[in-house]
Image (cartoon, helix red, strand yellow):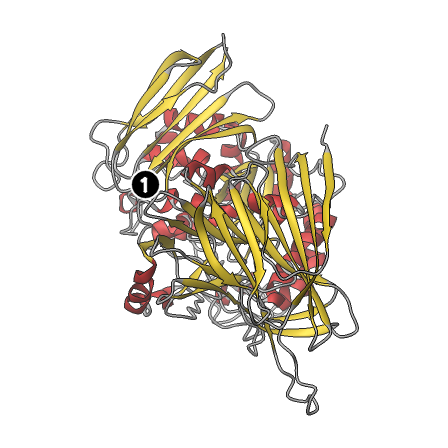
């Protein structure tokens, strides 16, 4: 039974003295004060070590050029007094619809500081929630006569660092997170961005905004062994936050994504901003296991969640990414007009992937191997000129190509116990997608689709908007909530980075919002990429990384010269290391058939869990995690390494006492290497028990996977 306790600890009168709130175990402390100018200021410690130096808070408001003299906007930056302070404690245990664990504890101490600005007669509240592993803060604006509607020019939330920490970062960008991670001191960020600024323009839509700007979630490590992570939670009706570094003073400051005319946010009170979060620990494993971002979101708003289910799937996708198949049906058309172009008069190009026969082949493979769904991309009219033209009316999301029989294929799939997964590439025309959304979801309901992969490749329409602006964040949320009404799960690609909203709307089963497996066909990801993402991108929610590529050297079966920067066993490890309730077997059926003994792990592994234990972790170097499959006594273990080979030590202390387990270890063989010998693997079977220790060699760029089936 879930229990919730709220205890009012204090209601304090007006004061100017510093006030401190500590976490339940006392390890984290946060102190609030006002500067001599009345500017809100906070600092943060962990086990008496300074984590965040005194840092200012506040919002700069946009000035209305039409305002009368003397009526210009007043910033919410300084000139404040403290009206009162409220302190409370909260402790609950809640059950996620899906997740890494069956339950999550949400335990914090809170301080709400109620501020008054005499010059404008305005009130705001800054709320702090302090956990044993970090804190969250947000601005709250009660409705009041003097603060009803306002426009944010910039939010000035600071995170003052104590030294030149090691940073694991990607450049701040209003449109994409599809970058490889850099590892530099804070003072090294400027030089890297300056060096690679032209290369950063290679994505379909990029807007790098600063020479020292970075994106969240930002992972840091101090010289004395503290791990610090800065992010945000519950970003709703607000632009996405980036961080801009003053590299002389080592102070990060929030930097919001603007709209098409440069404004950052349009607010109507009452309103709460997203939470600004700082996680801290002297153990890297806590960065992966603590659920600060989820806990700072609201409870689930979907009453009946029985239709939401973790899913393993395959799909008509990788061939197109690699280049042996196409999304488009014909090469005859220089352009397409919805409702006008007659595809019946066009000659098929012979490379179209989403044909009846090809889709049936994937359905057969899914049914044979216990995969629940089959994604099909390129099934609908319009792909001939979908990209690069900023078309408003690019797809209608309901009209299939002549060689895709939607009714026949759905009947065929359902007869075999498999569902098709819908694909809606919007080409970033959000206006067009919203116009067609109800019809598109109604079509899915008609044919029994229960999941959609959305895409936002290219520059946003409305033109001039960015992927991470307030307007677009509202669009993505509108799609999620509309999908929930239709009992449809959403896997959003190229959308905004997640901020834990999947707690409130668990039909958001996946996002991309980072550089995924597809880039292995575009030149590759660095070998440490997948042992970096759990520390950064996955802090906000699961990623549809699309793992499972067995034929890692693409030139062996295509004209693509790229290769996947992991070993085969490294690919297996991603089903554990890259947590998601939505996991793809991304390679081609014929490739899996060649390595059927290794594919057995993908058949067996779960994607929903009762428990997870991070056994080893270091950013960009290695992760080892054990997970207990939902509703069973079976465990699965995955380990992934980066650029260096290592030996993982897996202590089976988490197994049930007195019980034996059938253990299958899928590991890199001697001589395996992601560049030179990626497919060398071996499978070892043994019986194990609680207390046993497995020492497993991981090749450079490699990894391992273990199934532990209770006898």
Q: Which residue is mark 1?
A: 621
Q: Residue 389 placed where, x, y %?
A: 49, 73
Q: Nearer the viewer, residue 699 or 26?
A: 26
Tally of numbered tags? 1
In the image, 144 versus 564, the foreground residue is: 144
Q: Residue furthest top?
A: 658
Estimate the x, y position of residue 144 in percent, counting from the top left. 78, 69
Q: Is residue 536 visible in this depiction of the protein?
A: no
Residue 642 location (% of width, % of height)? 30, 41
Q: Residue at x 38, y 62 (%)?
A: 250
Dot 1 falls on a residue whose secondary structure is: loop
Q: Quadrant of the N terminus?
A: top right
Residue 84 drawn at (x, y percent): 71, 58
Q: Residue at x 64, y 32 (%)?
A: 415
**Horizontal side of residue 601 vs 337, given as left or right:** left
In the picture, measured across the screen, residue 679 lies left or right of residue 686, that is left
Q: Quadrant of residue 227?
A: top left
Of residue 548 and residue 526, the one placed in the foreground of this image is 526
Mark 1 closeness class: few <14, some 14–19, many ≥20 residues within 10 Å: many
Near-viewer residue (350 or 254)? 254
List the single residue furthest toward the right. Answer: 145
């Amino acid at each position: 039974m879930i229990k919730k306790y709220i205890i009012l600890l204090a209601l304090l009168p007006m004061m100017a003295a510093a006030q401190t709130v500590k976490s339940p175990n006392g390890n984290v402390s946060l102190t609030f004060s006002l500067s001599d100018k009345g500017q809100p200021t906070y600092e943060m410690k962990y086990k008496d070590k300074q984590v965040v130096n005194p840092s200012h808070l506040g919002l700069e408001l946009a000035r209305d050029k039409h305002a009368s003299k003397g009526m210009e906007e007043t910033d919410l930056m300084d000139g404040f007094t403290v009206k009162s302070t409220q302190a409370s404690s909260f402790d609950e245990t809640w059950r996620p619809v899906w997740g890494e664990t069956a339950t999550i504890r949400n335990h914090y101490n809170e301080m709400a500081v109620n501020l008054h600005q005499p010059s404008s007669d305005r009130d705001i509240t800054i709320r702090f929630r302090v956990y044993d592993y970090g804190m969250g803060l947000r601005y709250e604006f009660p409705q009041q006569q003097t603060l009803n509607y306002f426009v944010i020019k910039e939010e000035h939330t600071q995170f003052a660092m104590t030294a030149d920490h090691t940073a694991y970062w990607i450049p701040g960008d209003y449109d994409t997170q599809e970058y490889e991670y850099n590892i530099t001191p804070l003072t090294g960020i400027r030089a890297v961005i300056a060096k690679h600024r032209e290369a950063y323009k290679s994505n379909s839509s990029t807007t790098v905004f600063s020479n020292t700007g970075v994106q969240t979630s930002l992972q840091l490590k101090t010289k004395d062994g503290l791990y610090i992570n800065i992010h945000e939670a519950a970003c709703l009706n607000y632009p996405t936050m980036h961080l801009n570094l003053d590299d002389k003073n080592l102070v990060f400051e929030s930097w919001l994504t603007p709209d098409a005319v440069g404004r950052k946010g349009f607010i109507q009170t009452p309103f709460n901003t997203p939470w600004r979060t700082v996680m801290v620990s002297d153990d890297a494993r806590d960065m992966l296991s603590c659920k600060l971002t989820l806990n700072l979101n609201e409870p689930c708003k979907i009453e009946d969640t029985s239709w939401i289910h973790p899913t393993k799937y395959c799909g008509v996708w990788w061939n197109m990414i690699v280049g042996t198949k196409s999304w488009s049906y014909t090469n005859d058309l220089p352009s397409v007009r919805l409702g006008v172009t007659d595809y019946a008069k066009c000659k098929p190009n012979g490379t179209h992937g989403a044909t009846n026969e090809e889709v049936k082949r994937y359905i057969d493979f899914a049914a044979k191997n216990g995969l629940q769904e089959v994604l099909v991309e390129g099934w609908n009219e319009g792909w001939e000129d979908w990209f690069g033209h900023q078309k408003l009316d690019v797809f209608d999301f309901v009209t299939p190509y002549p060689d895709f029989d939607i009714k026949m294929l759905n009947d065929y799939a359902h007869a075999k116990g498999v569902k098709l997964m819908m694909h809606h590439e919007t080409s970033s025309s959000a206006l067009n997608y919203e116009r067609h959304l109800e019809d598109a979801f109604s079509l899915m309901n008609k044919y029994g689709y229960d999941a959609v992969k959305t895409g936002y490749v290219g520059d946003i329409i409305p033109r001039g908007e960015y992927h991470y602006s307030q307007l677009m964040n509202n669009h993505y949320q509108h799609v999620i909530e509309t999908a929930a009404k239709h009992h449809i799960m959403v896997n959003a690609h190229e959308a905004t980075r997640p901020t834990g909203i999947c707690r409130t709307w668990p039909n958001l089963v996946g996002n991309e919002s980072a550089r995924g497996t597809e880039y292995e066909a575009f030149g590759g990801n660095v070998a440490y990429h997948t042992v970096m993402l759990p520390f950064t991108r996955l802090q906000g929610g699961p990623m549809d990384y699309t793992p499972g590529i067995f034929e890692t050297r693409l030139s062996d079966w295509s004209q693509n010269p790229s290769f996947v920067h992991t070993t085969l066993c490294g690919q297996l490890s991603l089903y554990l290391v890259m947590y998601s309730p939505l996991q793809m077997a991304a390679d081609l059926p014929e490739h899996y058939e060649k390595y059927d003994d290794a594919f057995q792990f993908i058949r067996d592994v779960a994607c929903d869990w009762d428990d997870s234990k991070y056994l080893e972790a270091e950013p960009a170097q290695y992760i080892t995690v054990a997970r207990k499959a939902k509703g069973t006594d079976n465990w699965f273990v995955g380990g992934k390494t980066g650029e260096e080979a290592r030996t993982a030590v897996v202590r089976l202390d988490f197994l049930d006492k007195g019980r034996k387990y059938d253990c299958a270890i899928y590991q890199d063989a001697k001589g395996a290497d992601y560049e030179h010998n990626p497919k060398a693997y071996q499978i070892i079977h043994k019986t194990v028990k609680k207390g046993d220790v497995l020492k497993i060699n991981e090749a450079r760029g490699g990894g391992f996977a273990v199934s532990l089936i209770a006898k």
